[in-house]
Image (cartoon, rainbow, N blue to C red):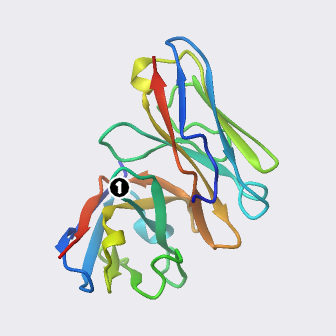
């Protein structure tokens, strides 16, 4: 049971916009920033979004993040087949004194 | 460019010990906290431990507290994870990751490719 809650799966067709939610609480998302990671099949996780809505260099602006209260969201617009991956949210938890992750969302491009 | 390379994984019997290493390059190692994160086969990411840039602060997930020890050698740009009293549910791919924020304890930024630990008799 992960501290942060994500839907186990999401899907969309090429060109569509999809969003993935991440729900937490007062000790994590509410008071700390959220990162999103993309894990392509058979590879290591890669930082996709940091500080709620910032993109590292090289990440397309099709990917965007937002946070409100105890929840965060990742939006992917102009969906492409190579966006098929697992997506994880993470935030620092002040009670556990360490990062906590969501359970991951498997994105399928139909 | 930032690079972290894990090593030391393998097959080990329950109750035994293993030490993982993570060699870092491409950034000022002594200025960043370092994390270990693991992923059991077919499962999600689980944070394991973090060590501050100077080694003075260390924090662990409850699942490994008292059994695992994180350490670092800033002269060698290397972070370690000593794993004792290993159990079957420690079987996972162990990732080393550089923290995102200089001098602070925050979230993982750059990840290595991982080293596989299998605990089995």
* Relative image position of residue B80 (x, y in whole percent): 33, 76
Residue at (53%, 24%) from the top-left corner? A11
**Residue B104 visible at all:** no
Between B21 and B13, the one lying in front of the other is: B13
Residue at (70%, 70%) from the top-left corner? A94
Residue at (38%, 36%) from the top-left corner? A40
* Relative image position of residue A62 (x, y in whole percent): 57, 22
What's the chain of the residue with tag 1?
Answer: B
* Relative image position of residue B65 (x, y in whole percent): 48, 83
Residue at (58%, 58%) from the top-left corner? A2
Q: Residues within 10 Å of mark 1 (few under 14, many from 20)?
A: few
Residue sitting farthest toward the right: A69
A47 left or right of B81 in image: right
A107 above or below B84?
Answer: above
Determine whether the residue tagged by mark 1 lies in a helix, strand or loop.
Answer: loop
| Total numbered labels | 1
Residue sitting farthest toward the top: A15
A14 above or below A87?
Answer: above
Tell me the quarter of the image containing the C terminus of chain B.
Answer: bottom left
**Residue B58 visible at all:** yes
Which residue corresponds to mark 1? B26
* Relative image position of residue B113 (x, y in whole percent): 30, 52
């Amino acid at each position: 049971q992960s501290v942060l809650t994500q839907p186990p799966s999401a899907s969309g067709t090429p060109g569509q916009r999809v969003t993935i939610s991440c729900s937490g609480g007062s000790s994590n998302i509410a008071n700390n920033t959220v990162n999103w990671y993309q894990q392509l099949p058979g590879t290591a996780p890669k930082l996709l979004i940091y500080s709620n809505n910032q993109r590292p260099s090289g990440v397309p602006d099709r990917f965007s993040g937002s946070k409100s209260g105890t929840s965060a969201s990742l939006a992917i617009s102009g969906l492409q087949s190579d966006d098929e991956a697992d997506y994880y949210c993470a935030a620092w938890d002040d009670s556990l004194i360490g990062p906590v992750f969501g359970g991951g969302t498997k994105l399928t491009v139909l | 460019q930032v690079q972290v390379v894990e090593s030391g994984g393998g097959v080990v019997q329950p109750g035994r010990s293993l030490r993982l290493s993570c060699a870092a390059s491409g950034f000022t190692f002594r200025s960043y906290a370092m994390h270990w994160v693991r992923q059991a086969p077919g499962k999600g990411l689980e944070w394991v431990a973090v060590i501050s840039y100077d080694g003075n602060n260390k924090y662990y997930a409850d699942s490994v507290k008292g059994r695992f020890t994180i350490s670092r050698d800033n002269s060698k740009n290397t972070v370690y994870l000593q794993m004792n009293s290993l159990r079957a549910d420690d079987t996972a791919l162990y990732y080393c990751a550089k923290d995102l924020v200089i001098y602070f304890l925050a979230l993982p930024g750059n990840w290595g490719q991982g080293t596989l630990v299998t605990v089995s008799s």
